Amino acid sequence: MSEASTALREPWPDLARQREGVTFGIWIFLATEVLFFGGLFLGYSVYRTLYTEAFREAAKETEIFFGSINTVVLLTSSMTMTVAVRAADHGYRRLTLICLWVTLLLGLGFLTGKGFEYNDDLTKGLFPGPGFPLPQPQEQIFWAFYWVMTGVHAIHLSVGIGVVAVVAVQLQRTVIKLESGTLTAVGLYWHFVDLIWITLVPLIYLVDRP
Amino acid sequence: MTAITVVDLPPPKPASYLDEGHTVWSWLTTTDHKRIGILFALSITVFFFIAGVAIGLVRLELLSPQGLFLTDDEYNRLFTIHGITMVWFFLVPSIPTTLGNFLLPLMIGARDLAFPRLNLMSWYLFTIGGIFTIYTLWAGGVDTGWTFYTPFSTLYSNGHVIAAAFGVFVTGFSSIATGLNFIVTTHMLRAPGMTWFRLPLMVWAIYAVSLVMVLATPVLAMSLLLVMAERLLGVPIFNPNNGGDPLLFQHLFWFYSHPAVYIMILPAMGVVSEVITCFARRRVFGYAGMVFALLAIAVIGFMVWGHHMFVSGQSPYASLVFSFLSFIVAVPSAIKTFNWTATLYRGHISFESPMLYALGFIGLFTVGGLTGLFLASVPIDIQAHDTYFVIAHFHFIMVGGSVTAYFAGLHYWWPKITGRMYLETWARVAAIFTFFGFMMTFMPQYIMGWLGMPRRYHHYADVFQIWHVMSTGGAGILAIAYVLPLIYLPLSLIRGARAPANPWQATGLEWQTPSPPPKENFEHTPIVTTGPYEYHPAAEPGLAEMQRPHRTQTEDA
Amino acid sequence: MSEQQSQQRPSRLKLWRDAGLIWFGLWSLFAVNVFLAYVPLGGANVPVHMSVAFLMMVLLVGFFMDFKEHPALLRFAAFAGVFWLIFMFVLTASDYFTRQ
């Protein structure tokens, strides 16, 4: 009784409705995210159509090793997040918490990998500007998009990590309840960040390998 | 959570949401949609006057062809701050976040919006964005115009582009949060019996505008993010030296900013539908048509953005497509205008101040809409592009339409929001001043625009001076019309008579609860059994015969 | 209520097995995608890679995000985002592909 009353928030009449509302809200948010990244993908597509050759040359410099490792890390984190959400649905409290913390660690792992990759890129001087190592001016556009796309994705992932941490702590302290629907929302966001990465990988790393 | 207190009797229940705490802190931490609506109203009033003062200075400066007291740079910065502040900090949030926030749950019989804390966060995001804009102003302004066109904004401008763009960026998330909240609320929290086709048109308008906010704003966020990235990090995205295409920015920007016009006008249409029906004592003519027109405008409005780019170097074939679609979007707007007029037909019209504003809206919106058709046509746009004709056109929609409707709504629901009646005489004076001041400000702009006066020019040819002087004179009258409510509305809080629950004898759930409403909106969740606008019995077959106009032969002749 | 739920609820192992299966599918597809990058595809590069990525998205959205279990309204919300994205791409392309 008391559990149900704390999981239920104003102004919802009942818990099922609240859960549906929260999930609906997060899907609308994800739709906005689709268009947010959509603007970026549109720019990329336009330039890649205009400067196919330059993009092909520029993309050869990307670090497919880090890209691949990070993809697998992120896919794995999506798996643990799925288990966390379903475990919460079925009332496996401990499993939920463990999976959340593992997800969080994998997310941090991704960021670490990204950090190493950025470091390599910078060592090679691949930040657009004067003295850029690649010859064609359009190749700088590819790298501009590389930094913006991966950067915005990394910010999204960092937000995700932060949210997972907060939710995990709050679940542990039973500030929020397993059945409140919060975790479903967090899970959907996490998967979406993964989804964006899946879209980014072919655009960045798989353009044309020698 | 309320603390457990050891007293025999529970403390008396606060009479209304206004009595739920009188400290500033209680307002800043509120999750009550009614209070958040008022927070928004106060914020946008501040921005309205900042932007108004900026353009007032510009209009004074334009009294003389050589200018009077501003440098070119100051002039650019003033019209830019006017544009940025008016668009993003007044017009876009104006009706949705104030009246919409206050009324949506009341109109559908809900206790609050779906996500009350998100609603509060929306206000804080808005405020943070606003602080950046005020910082921009304080630091010396920005000179790109409100459109942030590249490559000027990214490579050449010496204004505070990043602070301004970031302010708008943050405010965009406020829009998204509010829109999301409204959509979920409309879908999930309607009172029993409140079916979709019993919703007042105001709710439909808020719903339609929320769709646009949610789907368009993220693209603006991305385009501004790219501008900031290019300016801050020096990465070439729109830079032509690297093969970048400045038109790409315009595509992204107008993908938001054209629908943004519909963000401004759709809720205005909702307000006007409520006011017209109430003061004509008529059911709205063609309810279903009105609903579908709102939705059609929201959807088709997304597909017309290229008409801002007819002379930009966009492909002429694309221009044809966008021109055609722009004509299409005029159809639902026309349907709405005809339906409002038809609603007035045989109505018992009374001319209270909200009605005066609403009638003004119909006239001004019609003029603005029709001149929009001129501009949607490619050959005419080539002549009129970037002239005062365009300025006059969109001010007729945004100011003549949205701002007038905002004032209509503010007066109409003021008794509900505050529990007080304002001085009707003064309100009528303000409404009439608004209409005539507006006409006098912007009609000359149509004329001089057509004659070739370009927008954003600091110095101009002497032949245009007479039109500029008229326009500035009109702006003075308009300023009086906008300052008046700032006096008599707050005054009503102290001296106004207590408002009854339903001062206008209007239909709609919001009038069935006390003025001002209690925190939880309704004593008991209302059960809805009828459609909106039950101002007279539905026409039945026999009745229809009686209601048909009995015109005499002399009238026909 | 909760007792009844606990009798019917799937074992922890089943949760892991279901998610693991999809995970396996996801990274297999990813491996295919990386492999294809070394095959000279020419103009087919974008369609091929994006198709494989699309299959990965289908797995992710369909099974990890429980798309098919959502009410129609929620699916509609998700489609709206994609639908509007198509507007944006098609109409912008109408400019870029017809420029002289």
Image: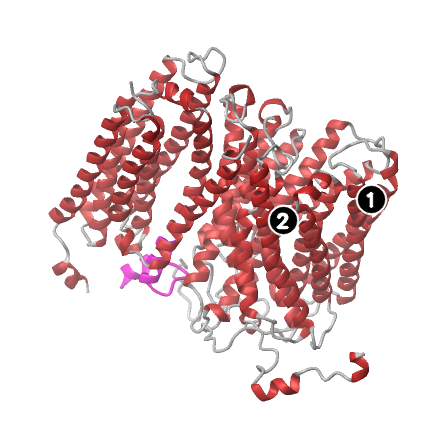
In which quadrant of the rendered view does residue A112 lie?
Answer: top left
Check disc 2 and give the amino acid type: Leu
Between B526 and B373, which is closer to the camera in this rendering? B373
Is residue B121 in view from this perspective?
A: no
Alpha carbon distance from label 2 to label 1 = 22 Å
From the viewer's side, name the closer residue of B1 and B554. B554
Q: Which residue is mark 1?
A: B472
Note whether B298 is above or below A132 in the view shown.
below
Badge 2 or badge 1: first in the primary sequence: 2
Marks 1 and 2: in contact by CB < 8 Å?
no
Residue B83 appears left or right of B179 = right
Q: Quadrant of the C terminus of chain B?
A: bottom right
Magenta residue span: A1-24
Assess whether residue A10 is covered by the magenta stretch. Answer: yes
Q: Which residue is mark 2?
A: B91
Image-based side of A65 in relation to B373, left or right: left
